[in-house]
């Protein structure tokens, strides 16, 4: 007796938030494209869609919390202050009067040592700027002679403001958003497992139904792709600062109890 293909029944709890959401979006599309004429299957799918909608809302709220306008504006101001200080030091290092250029040389070395990338995530840039300014404290005389002390001071103020906003944002996220997303994910996981169970059962009992064979095949292919690309490194982040989000934290895993490895 040939046993029909089945969808692997695995836990998806280890996936990052974005990968988890994207995968369940694919599952929802599959169950809309291919429908099985079975009351229990349809009930499981309806419950899954309801759970997915809640995760959808929670995930969007979570993503929105990463785009706090004050933090983005503070980061832009910090980048502007850093660029002004860096460019001024570079310009003075090329000044035709040696007595002036020599004051810029040690400051330029500090700039080059840190190679700050303003497109890095908020936290990383904050740490680099803070360390760079600490190193520059050894050359306060040079900063003063070049009239750049005020720029260094303003950069520190901007950096401190960014760090404060990061702390406030993280506290808000931890208290208000992560709990909702974690709960939504757990509900989605349970509903998804039920869809897999009833789809497999229907396909096993109705091996001659083409729609059942097609749905199992497509869902298994989707699962294999998800397992290969999203489950191998659950801490990998796909969201970085170039789109303005800042920290790559929307890909954190917030499921309360990750299951055993695959």
Image (tube, grey):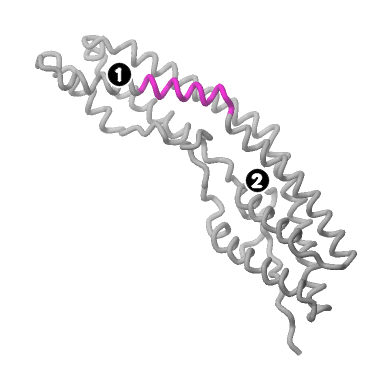
Circle nearer the N terminus (2, 1): 1
Task: Reply yes or no: does residue 74 show up in magenta.
Answer: yes
Name the residue nearer the viewer: 258 or 155: 155
| Residue 179, above or below 51 | above
Rendered residue at 77%/50% (across/down): 187
Q: Quadrant of residue 135?
A: top left
Q: Choose mark 2 or mark 1, whichever is in front.
A: 2
Q: Quadrant of the N terminus?
A: bottom right
Res. 262 mark = none
Name the residue nearer the viewer: 146 or 88: 88
Residue 156 picture location, percent across and down: 40, 18
Name the residue nearer the viewer: 138 or 185: 185
The residue lying furthest to the right in this view is: 39
Residue 118 shown left or right of residue 53 in the figure: left
| Residue 111, above or below 24 | above
Name the residue nearer the viewer: 153 or 28: 28
Element type at mark 1: helix
Residue 52 shown left or right of residue 109 in the figure: right
Residue 154 shown left or right of residue 22 in the figure: left
Residue 155 picture location, percent across and down: 39, 18
Residue 157 picture location, percent across and down: 43, 16
Label 1 belongs to which residue? 137
Res. 254 mark = 2
Rendered residue at 38%/19% (across/down): 81
| Residue 83, above or below 249 | above
Q: Is the residue marked by circle 1 packed among few (<14), some (14-19), or many (20+) residues within 10 Å?
A: some
Task: Reply yes or no: does residue 122 show up in magenta.
Answer: no
The span picked out in magenta is: 68-82
Residue 20 shown left or right of residue 88 in the figure: right
């Amino acid at each position: 007796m040939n046993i029909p293909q089945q969808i692997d029944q695995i836990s998806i709890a280890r996936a990052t938030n974005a990968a988890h959401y994207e995968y369940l979006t694919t599952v929802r599309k599959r169950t809309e494209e291919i429908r099985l004429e079975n009351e229990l299957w349809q009930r499981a799918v309806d419950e899954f869609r309801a759970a997915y909608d809640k995760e959808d809302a929670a995930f969007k709220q979570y993503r929105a919390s990463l785009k706090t306008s004050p933090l983005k504006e503070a980061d832009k101001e910090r980048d502007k202050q850093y660029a002004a200080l860096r460019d001024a030091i570079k310009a003075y290092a090329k000044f035709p009067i040696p007595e002036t250029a020599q004051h810029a040389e040690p400051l330029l070395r500090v700039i080059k040592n840190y190679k700050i990338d303003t497109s890095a995530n908020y936290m990383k840039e904050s740490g680099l700027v803070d360390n760079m300014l600490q190193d520059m404290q050894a050359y306060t005389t040079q900063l003063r002679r070049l009239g750049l002390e005020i720029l260094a001071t303003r950069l520190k103020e901007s950096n401190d403001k960014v760090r404060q906003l990061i702390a406030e944002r993280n506290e808000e996220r931890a208290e208000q958003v992560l709990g909702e997303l974690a709960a939504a994910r757990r509900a989605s996981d349970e509903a998804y497992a039920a869809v897999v169970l009833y789809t497999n059962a229907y396909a096993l009992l109705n091996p001659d139904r083409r729609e059942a064979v097609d749905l199992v095949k497509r869902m298994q292919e989707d699962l294999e792709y998800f397992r290969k690309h999203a489950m191998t490194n659950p801490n990998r982040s796909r969201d970085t600062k170039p789109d303005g989000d800042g920290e790559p934290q929307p890909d954190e895993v917030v499921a309360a109890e990750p299951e055993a490895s695959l």
